Each structure stands twice: as structure tokens, then as C-alpha cells.
């Protein structure tokens, strides 16, 4: 196909997508509708004997691509991990953790913020559902932090950032989707995400400790009269009772994947069953809870798969119209090498995060950049996890950061949207610092998978 015609069709397709997206239509319908319209346009061009590759532009092939996407084995764990996250949200795990950690760290400046961040790490490694984690921490911890005299911006920023760790620390539904789009093993991506997730959590902990020490008014210790005085032995017992069940579940799920005992799909089934048993153990499980969790799982999974179908069709038609050569030539025209290309793509994803959801960015951008990164010899595991950390910023960046709206919906009276915007700025900067660290030290991503799986990766 003529390159000028390819450029025209690709630009027209992107322009149509952006125009319809700004009109307020659901993203899944916009992606699918634009894909179908331009697939029909390709059929018209074929019928008019315009030089277009007929093999790529048939409606039948578009349907075959959608069927192949929906039957992908790598997506099987996704609804099970979603169910696991929603069930743990109802199990009472976070309530017990917050109560015991608040007692343990109450004497320390910033202790409650550190407790919230620690709970965020535990929830991240056991749920991976951002909306549930942010809403749960916002409901349980934010009122306590404000009552203890925490600065509003510092408190809301800590809660939002802690709740968003679940999108990076495995098991993560984002990593499952990214593995499918980048032709990577879910297990490899989970193992590779462990150290980056801990690096980001360590940056958060360091920020809280340093600023609480330098500016105690931001995060004062709990007043003595409000402390729950318990013996060290009893406190240790409470912490163990609160931590052991979720930690055991984390090791059952992730350990079985990391050590090759179970596939990600099997481990996700173990996690879903374990979360249900944990809710039953905590006397939080009944038929009403099971029905609600099932409905929330179906709603979340349907939303993800609807966008997935639309994005898969969009990418297939764009490729059929000659999108790959157009995008590759645009990338090749950049005046720098592979490292500069990676940085440019990170900048693009960061800017898109201000306006689009992570699912849309993942399913639109990754299929387009996958062949480019392969041709440039960029390690796909390293690049994918850089992209994952970059996408994490989209949860906190206004105007459409989902964590901001989740938190605003459960925040106590007096917490305004401008408090949320100002509060997340330091944590967005820390996420960008995390990207810089992973960019400069790729071994932080690749070392653990190579140690566990060797050259087979």
C-alpha cells in the first residue's frame, strides 16, 4: 500500500478515535466502533481496486483476531484475581492490620502513615484491586489520620499512594494484561515486578520518615491519652494474628508461581479459594457477601474485557491499514538511539495518563510499540515493567486519576479536591524517581527472573 495513503488512513483513524473519545462515549464502544468503521473502509478500498493488502483488511480476519484475544489462555487468571481482591476487601483483613499497626507505631512521628503504607503493601500483594484498596484505606485510615492532626494533603497523598501499590506489586491484573499484549509469561512479569514494587514502596517509606522527622507538624505521633496501651507480648500476638493469614495467602499464590508449582491460572484459583476461606474464618462470609463479590467481579471483568476487545480490534485494523510502517518510520526519525526511544515512550505514556485510564493506554499503546521494541533489541521484560511504573502515575495524576475519585468518594467532610491534587504531587514525583532508578539500573528488573529461571526466560 502506498505510504502516503497509509499515513492518511492512520492519522484519520487516530483523529476519529480522539474526537469520539472527547464526545463522552464509552471507550470500549469508541475503540470497537472506529475499528469496525475503518475495517469496512478497507473493504471498500479493496472493492475499488485500491492497492490494499486484502488479507489484513477483511472483516473475517477482524472477527478471528477478536476471538483469538478472548480465548487467550494468559487472560484466564484475570477474573480469578479480581474475585480474590474483592473477597479480601470484604474479609476484614485490613481492619485488623490497621488496628494492630496503629498501636505498634503510635508513638512514632508519622507512625500512622507508615502503618497505612505497610498495609498498602500487604493489600497490594494480596488484592491488586486499586479501587477496593483506596476506598478501604480511605474509609478506615484517613479519618484517624485527620483526627490525630495530620496535615490534610499529607494524609490524602499517603492513602492514595498506598492504595495504588496494588497495580504494580503482584499479583496484579495490570501485569496479566501487559503480559498478554507483550507476549511475555505472566510468571516472568510477576517475578520481575517484585523488586520494582519494593523499590517504589521503599521510596514512599523514606519520604514519610524524612518529612515526619523534618516537619513533625505534618504527621504528629498519637497523643498518649489516645494510645491503646498493651503489653509487647500481646501486641506481637495481635500483629501475628493480623499478618499471618494474608501473608500465607500471598506466599500460596506467588510462591506457587515463582517456584513453578502452579501456573498463574491455577495460582489464581488458589487465591480466590483462599480469600473465600479467609473471609469465612473472619466470619465475614454469607450468601449476600458472596453475591455482592460475584457481581463486582463480573462488572470489573466485563469492563476490562470490553475495552480489551475494542482495543484488539483497533490495533488489528490499524496494522492492516499500514500503521506499523508509519509508526516505525516516525520512531526511526527520532534523533536518538534505543534509550532515547524508551524515554520518549515513557513521556508519551505519562502524558496520556492525565487523560486516559491505564487499561486504555495498555491496550492501545503496547500492541503498537511491541514490534518497535523488538526490532530495537530492547529487553521486553524491562520495558514492560518501566511502562507499568509509568502507568501507575495515571492513577494519581489529575484530572482523571481514578485514585483521586475513589478517595474523594469516601473522604470525610472538609477534604476537597484541591487537597487531593496537592497531596499526590510528592508521590507522583517519587514514581518518576522510581522510573529513573529502573531505567539506570535494569538489573533491578531482570536479576530475579534470571536467578530463578536462568537462560530459559
Image (spheres, rainbow, N blue to C red):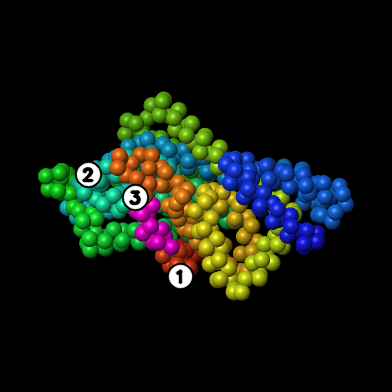
Disc assigned to residue 419: 3
Instruction: Say few, some or many: other residues with alpha carbon within 10 Å of mark 3 (under 14 / 14 to 19 / 20 or more).
Output: some
Residue 26 lies within the magenta run: no
Q: Say left or right for 326 vs 431.
A: right
Question: What's the CA distance linking mark 2 and mark 3?
Answer: 16 Å
Instruction: Say few, some or many: other residues with alpha carbon within 10 Å of mark 2 (under 14 / 14 to 19 / 20 or more).
Output: few
Q: In terms of secondary structure, what is the magenta stretch mainly?
A: helix
- Asked whether disc 2 touches disc 3, contact meaning CB atoms under 8 Å apart, the reply is no
Question: What's the CA distance linking mark 1 and mark 3?
Answer: 34 Å
Residue at (66, 52) in percent of width and height: 15
Magenta span covers which residues?
420-432
Q: How far from the left and from the top, in percent, is residue 304?
A: 55, 42
Q: Secondary structure at mark 1?
A: loop
Residue at (45, 51) in percent of width and height: 398
Q: Earlier in the sequence, mark 1 or mark 3?
A: 3
Disc assigned to residue 147: 2
Residue at (44, 33) in percent of width and height: 293
Disc assigned to residue 441: 1
Amino acid at each position: 500500500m502506498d505510504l502516503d495513503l497509509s499515513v492518511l488512513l492512520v492519522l484519520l483513524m487516530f483523529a476519529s478515535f480522539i474526537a469520539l473519545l472527547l464526545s463522552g462515549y464509552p471507550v470500549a464502544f469508541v475503540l470497537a466502533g472506529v475499528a469496525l468503521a475503518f475495517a469496512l473502509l478497507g473493504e471498500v478500498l479493496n472493492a475499488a481496486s485500491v492497492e490494499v493488502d486484502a488479507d489484513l483488511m477483511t472483516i473475517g480476519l477482524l472477527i478471528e483476531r477478536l476471538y483469538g484475544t478472548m480465548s487467550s489462555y494468559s487472560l484466564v487468571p484475570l477474573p480469578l484475581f479480581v474475585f480474590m481482591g474483592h473477597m479480601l476487601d470484604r474479609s476484614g483483613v485490613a481492619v485488623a492490620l490497621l488496628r494492630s499497626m496503629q498501636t505498634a507505631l503510635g508513638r512514632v512521628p508519622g507512625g500512622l502513615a507508615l502503618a497505612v503504607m505497610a498495609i498498602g503493601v500487604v493489600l497490594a500483594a494480596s488484592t491488586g484491586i486499586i479501587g477496593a484498596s483506596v476506598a478501604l484505606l480511605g474509609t478506615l485510615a484517613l479519618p484517624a489520620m485527620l483526627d490525630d492532626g495530620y496535615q490534610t494533603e499529607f494524609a490524602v497523598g499517603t492513602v492514595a499512594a498506598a492504595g495504588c501499590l496494588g497495580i504494580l506489586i503482584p499479583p496484579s491484573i495490570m501485569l496479566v494484561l501487559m503480559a498478554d499484549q507483550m507476549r511475555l509469561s505472566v510468571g516472568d512479569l510477576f517475578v520481575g515486578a517484585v523488586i520494582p514494587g519494593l523499590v517504589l514502596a521503599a521510596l514512599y517509606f523514606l519520604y514519610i520518615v524524612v518529612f515526619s522527622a523534618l516537619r513533625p507538624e505534618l504527621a504528629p505521633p498519637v497523643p498518649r491519652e489516645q494510645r491503646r496501651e498493651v503489653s509487647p507480648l500481646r501486641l506481637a500476638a495481635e500483629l501475628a494474628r493480623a499478618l499471618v493469614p494474608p501473608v500465607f495467602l500471598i506466599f500460596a499464590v506467588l510462591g506457587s508461581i515463582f517456584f513453578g508449582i502452579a501456573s498463574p491460572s491455577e495460582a489464581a484459583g488458589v487465591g480466590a479459594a483462599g480469600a473465600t476461606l479467609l473471609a469465612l474464618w473472619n466470619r465475614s462470609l454469607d450468601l449476600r457477601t458472596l453475591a455482592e463479590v460475584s457481581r463486582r467481579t463480573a462488572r470489573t471483568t466485563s469492563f476490562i474485557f470490553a475495552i480489551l476487545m475494542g482495543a484488539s480490534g483497533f490495533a488489528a485494523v490499524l496494522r492492516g491499514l499500514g500503521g506499523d510502517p508509519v509508526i516505525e518510520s516516525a520512531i526511526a526519525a527520532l534523533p536518538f538511539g534505543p534509550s532515547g526511544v524508551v524515554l520518549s515512550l515513557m513521556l508519551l505514556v505519562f502524558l496520556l495518563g492525565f487523560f486516559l485510564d491505564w487499561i486504555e493506554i495498555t491496550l492501545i499503546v503496547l500492541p503498537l510499540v511491541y514490534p518497535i521494541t523488538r526490532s530495537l533489541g530492547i529487553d521486553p521484560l524491562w520495558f514492560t515493567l518501566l511502562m507499568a511504573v509509568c502507568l501507575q502515575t495515571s492513577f494519581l495524576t489529575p484530572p482523571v486519576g481514578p485514585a483521586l475519585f475513589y478517595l474523594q468518594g469516601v473522604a470525610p467532610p472538609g477534604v476537597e479536591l484541591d487537597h487531593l491534587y496537592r497531596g499526590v504531587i510528592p508521590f507522583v514525583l517519587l514514581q518518576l524517581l522510581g522510573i529513573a532508578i529502573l531505567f539506570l539500573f535494569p538489573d533491578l528488573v531482570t536479576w530475579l527472573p534470571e536467578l530463578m529461571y536462568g537462560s530459559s526466560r
